[in-house]
Amino acid sequence: MAEVPVLLLCPFCGGEPSLHTSKGESLWSHEIVGWARVSCPDCDASGGNYCDDGELSAASQATEAWNMREPSALPADQGGEGE
């Protein structure tokens, strides 16, 4: 299983986000699959719900979507230009 990347801080408040995972029925195949989403407990920001797709785990997809932002918006120590 691929390692899930580290979550970046919340882009809205700078809070420490949480990855939530669960197992449940797929509405399309009716099989039990993995589900994941990322949310910030400080400001209630959250990403979408992601389902295992055969190539990437739900946790990997949710983390990748959460971490997606403009490079100039990232602090210098996280690969951006910073201030």
Image: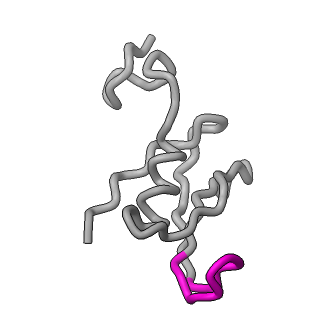
> Which residue is at the far front?
29
Mark count: 0
Which quadrant of the rendered structure holds the C terminus? top left
Inspect the magenta stretch and tell me whether residue 33 lies in it: yes
Name the residue located 71 percent from the left edge and 78 percent from the top edge: 27
Q: Position of residue 67 (x, y in %)?
A: 47, 42
Q: Position of residue 37 (x, y in %)?
A: 59, 62
With respect to residue 23, does 74 lie above or below?
above
Q: Is 63 placed left or right of 15 in the picture? A: left
Name the residue located 62 percent from the left edge and 85 percent from the top edge: 24
Question: Based on the displayed image, in which of its 4 quarters is residue 76 positioned?
Answer: top left
With respect to residue 22, does 12 lie above or below?
above
Which quadrant of the rendered structure holds the N terminus? bottom left
Which of these two is toward me, 75 or 5?
Answer: 5
With respect to residue 60, does 22 lie above or below?
below
Name the residue located 45 percent from the left edge and 25 percent from the top edge: 74
Q: Position of residue 23 (x, y in %)?
A: 56, 85
Q: Position of residue 47 (x, y in %)?
A: 64, 52
Q: Is 72 placed left or right of 39 in the picture? A: left
Q: Is 75 placed left or right of 14 in the picture? A: left
With respect to residue 18, does 72 lie above or below?
above
Q: Which residues are magenta?
A: 23-34
